Amino acid sequence: MAKSPMTMSFTPPPRRPKGESIVPMINVVFLLLIFFLMTSRLAPPEPFEVEPPRAEEGAEAVEAPVLYLSPEGEAGFEEARGEAAIAAFATRAQAAPGGEAPQLRADAQTEAAEVARVLKALTEAGLSEVSLVVAPQ
């Protein structure tokens, strides 16, 4: 009985295809994240929801310190409430650079007597000019 010759294959075994690298996609995501962080403006949240009164005329709002006045007459500035908010607002408004007047954002349902009381307190704190924010009619 004759032995059959064995054949040996010296070709390399077939390779599995390489998966796509996700490193470029990660780089793009981080670049977009950095771009949006650099171009966005982070502002503190409003102390409470305020619906300003309506007016026929008015100038465009500018960036300035804003004191909020709730429908119940509660003043809010950043984290401070009440008289502390009025004092903190007056201090910040006097120290603010530029000639922009600080803003009072009172709710449309706030009584005029409360608005007058807050304006008087701001005058006593040393502010001579405050802009009242209104919504277009």
Image (tube, helix red, strand yellow):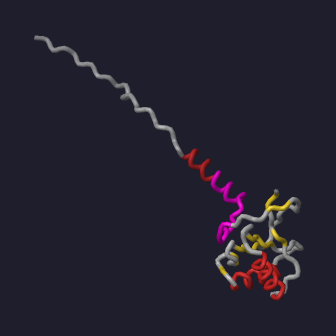
Q: Which residues are magenta?
A: 32-49
Residue depicted at 84% across the width and 72% down the height: 131
- Which residue is most to the bottom? 124
Inspect the magenta stretch and tell me whether residue 80 lies in it.
no
The residue lying toward the viewer, choosing from 122 and 70, is: 70
Quadrant in the picture for residue 48:
bottom right
Q: Position of residue 102 (x, y in %)?
A: 82, 74
The residue lying at 54 percent from left, 46 percent from top is 23
Q: Quadrant of the C terminus?
A: bottom right
Q: Is residue 127 left or right of residue 83?
A: right
Q: Is residue 117 left or right of residue 72?
A: right
Q: Residue 37 is drawn in which quadrant?
A: bottom right
Q: Residue furthest top?
A: 1
Name which quarter of the figure residue 46 lies in.
Answer: bottom right
As displayed, is residue 81 above or below residue 134?
below
Relative image position of residue 130 (x, y in whole percent): 84, 75
Closer to us: 134 or 98: 134
Q: Position of residue 63 (x, y in %)?
A: 80, 67
Q: Residue at x 72, y 57 (%)?
A: 39
Position of residue 44 measured from the top left corner of the image (x, y, whole percent) = 67, 69
Residue at horizontal 80 percent and vertical 67 percent from the top: 133
Q: Quadrant of the N terminus?
A: top left
Viewer-nearest residue: 38 or 116: 116
Instruction: Give the answer, above or below, for where 120 lies relative to 34.
Output: below
Query: Is residue 46 in the magenta section?
Result: yes
In the picture, measured across the screen, residue 128 lies left or right of residue 27, that is right
Residue 3, above or below 108: above
Figure label count: 0
